[in-house]
Structure formats: C-alpha cells, structure tokens
Amino acid sequence: MSLKLAVLGLLDVEPGSGYALLQRFRTSLGFFWQTTHQQLYKELHGLHEEGLVDCETVSQETRPDKKVYSLNARGAAELDALLTKAATPTKIRDPLLVKIFCGRRLGSDALRAEVESHRRKHEQTLALYRMLHEQIGKRPAAVRQRYHHPELTLRLGIRFEEAWLAWCEEIGAEL
Amino acid sequence: MSLKLAVLGLLDVEPGSGYALLQRFRTSLGFFWQTTHQQLYKELHGLHEEGLVDCETVSQETRPDKKVYSLNARGAAELDALLTKAATPTKIRDPLLVKIFCGRRLGSDALRAEVESHRRKHEQTLALYRMLHEQIGKRPAAVRQRYHHPELTLRLGIRFEEAWLAWCEEIGAEL
DNA sequence: TCGCGCATGTAATCCGTTACATGATTCC
DNA sequence: GGAATCATGTAACGGATTACATGCGCGA
C-alpha cells in the first residue's frame, strides 16, 4: 500500500511521466522505500484503471512519446484516505542481522569483514544524507518550507545511519 | 532468502517442530525479521524437499502428532554457503516515513498524533529490549557466550529504538 | 561504434500476508 | 462453557524481484 501512497504523493506535488516520477523517487522517497521501473509502471496503470489519475500522451520530437500522469479529484480523495489510516511500525529486516544471529558457524574474521563492509556503506550513506540536509538548510526559507516534510524523514535517515555506524564500530572491535 | 537462513540457523542450534521453531523465532530473530506459521511450515516443507533437513514424525499421547525437523549435513553445508554470501544493506521501509513524506495534505495535528503513537510503541519496544539485554547480562559467563551473537543484534535493536524515540520527540515538538 | 539517457512495457517467479480450516486438551 | 495452547495445514492474493525486450538520439 505504501507504493500507492508514494506515487499519489509524488503526483500531488507535480504531474509527470513514469520515467520522471522514477527520477524523483530515487532522489527522495527512494532513500527509505524502494521500487523498480517495472513496479512503478504497473502501479500507474493500476491507478489509471481505478480512475485515480489522469493520463495524457505527449508526443516529443527527438524523444520517445511519454505518458504524463496527474492526480485528479478522486485520486486526491484516495490520498487523503490513505494518509488517515494509521501506519504500524515495521521490523528492521536487514539480512545482516539474520546472518549475525546465525553467525556462530562463521569465523570471527569473516563476520568482522562483513561488518566492516557494511560500516563503509553506511558511512557513505550518512555522508550523502548530511550533504542533502545541508543543501536544504542553505535554501531560502520559502523553499525550505516546501521541503519540510521530506526534511523530517531525512533526519531519521541520518539518525539511523549514525546508529548503524556506531554499532558497526562497537561490534567490529569486539568480534 | 533470509527466512531460509533463519530456519537453518535455528535448526543448527537445536532440532524442533515447526511449532517449536516458531516459538523460538518469535522471541529471538522475530524482533528483526518476521514470519507467520504458514510461511514457516512452507519453508520447512521446501527445505525437506530439497533434502537439507531431516524430518521425523513423533506421536504424542495427549497432544497432536508433531514433525521434528533437524539439520543434516547437506543443510549445514547450505547454511555455510548462505552465511558466506555477502548481505547488502536494506532501506528502512517503514510506512510512517512515506506518510510523513507525503504528509503536506494531512494537518499538523493528525501527523503529531501519529508520531506520538509511534513514539509510544517504540518506547515499549525499547523497554523490552533493555530488559532482555539485562537478563542476558545476569547469566553466567558460559551461558552468555552462547548468546553472544543474538546479543549483538539486540544491541542494534536498542540503538534503533533509541533513534526512533529521539526522532519522534524532536519532530513531534516541531510539528 | 559503443554506451548512456530517454521512455515504456511483458512475463516468470518468489516472498509475504490474510483468510479459512481442523481438532484435542487444559485451565479458569 | 469458553478461551488458550498445541499442532498442522490449504488457498488466494498482492507485492517485490529479476530477466527479457524494444528503439531512437546523442556524445565520446
């Protein structure tokens, strides 16, 4: 259900083609949710069939035709309905935890190496998030206002990556 | 793939029926991964068909018959193979983030209420994890040694819940 | 000429969730 | 009498992943 919400939410901000939506997704919601172009296109077909979005085919000269989707009144109502339904917290669901949990059989060296590799990835992600966060901070207040909600999610992302990093360092030293 | 790893890992520690495995799962790996009895039973059937686990039907007098599964040599080899393959980090994937991201339409009051409700749940989860962690700390060193890997995962759980809590408090105050 | 970006899709498979189903025993 | 525990499953559906597929234009 969250992908549906995500797509409606993106269209609420601005109409766009599947391709364009995917670009926006990757650099925003995509940090915390994931999808592929296949799934996105399917979702858009579904939303169109349900009558929640309008679709207009736009011919382009030097580029392939594109289908520009936009939120209509029914879609906006559906978005509001989805936003009203309470979300339940989910589990971490990171395969690394399952591995470590079952890691008795694996030697300390192998575990340490894997933890170190994760540490590096989380370090990179943290750097990226911090950079994005700084960039938002530099914008004029009016623009910042528009990015307020995304910025809130980014802050959780930062806290999580910090938690990952600290944990990787702690247990890497211990293994 | 992680459920397969989880089941093999649980059987590596001790054989058991699907029902027994589910109990153990719920109070250990289940904090970070989730499953249902349906999925577990299906996985066990699959593993048995693949020849990775042995299965013995045990009749009981006052209880229904049960099937006790145990890891065999091929299963142990498969477990080692899975443990060797690198795990890639995953996204947070919590629906609350998608909601907040798209939350412009929802009023501050509704958002604040939802964040507060999540805060309470994470508070409870944190309390539970801390209690479990303390209990492990009280055990004699020999026992603690056996729970070392699970304990490492629990520590990440604690850090995550702390991050959630701090974030909920921060943005709750701001909304 | 090779690869990248634009733009869209089908198909197969797997994983996860929800609903439905049974039936004995034990405890309140 | 009713609920919880033990113990196992089938079926339907939906969401996610992976592979396969097409075709033009542009820059190195």
Image (spheres, coloured by chain):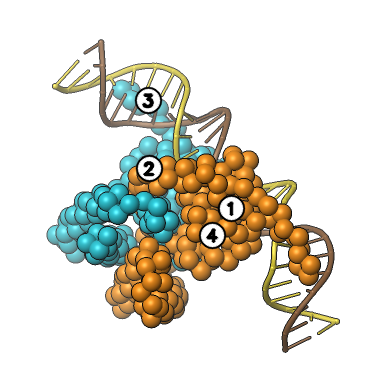
Chain colours: A cyan, B orange, C brown, D yellow
Determine which residue is flagged by label 2: B85
Which element carries disc 1, helix, strand or loop? strand
Q: Residues within 10 Å of mark 2 (few under 14, many from 20)?
A: few
Distance from Cα at disc 2 to Cα at disc 4: 23 Å
Kindly identify which chain the residue marked by label 3 belongs to.
A
Q: Is residue B79 visible?
A: yes
Which element carries disc 4, helix, strand or loop? loop
Which element carries disc 3, helix, strand or loop? loop
A116 with respect to A37 (left or right): left
Determine which residue is flagged by label 3: A64
What residue is rendered at 58% in x and 66% in y? Answer: B23
Q: Quadrant of residue B145?
A: bottom left
Determine which residue is flagged by label 1: B70
**Where does the image place residue B149, in percent across and percent down from the top left?**
37, 62
Distance from Cα at disc 4 to Cα at disc 3: 59 Å
Q: Quadrant of residue B86?
A: top left
> Which comes sooner in the sequence, label 1 or label 4?
4
What residue is rendered at 71% in x and 54% in y? Answer: B57
Q: Nearer the viewer, residue A107 or A21?
A: A107
Distance from Cα at disc 1 to Cα at disc 3: 57 Å
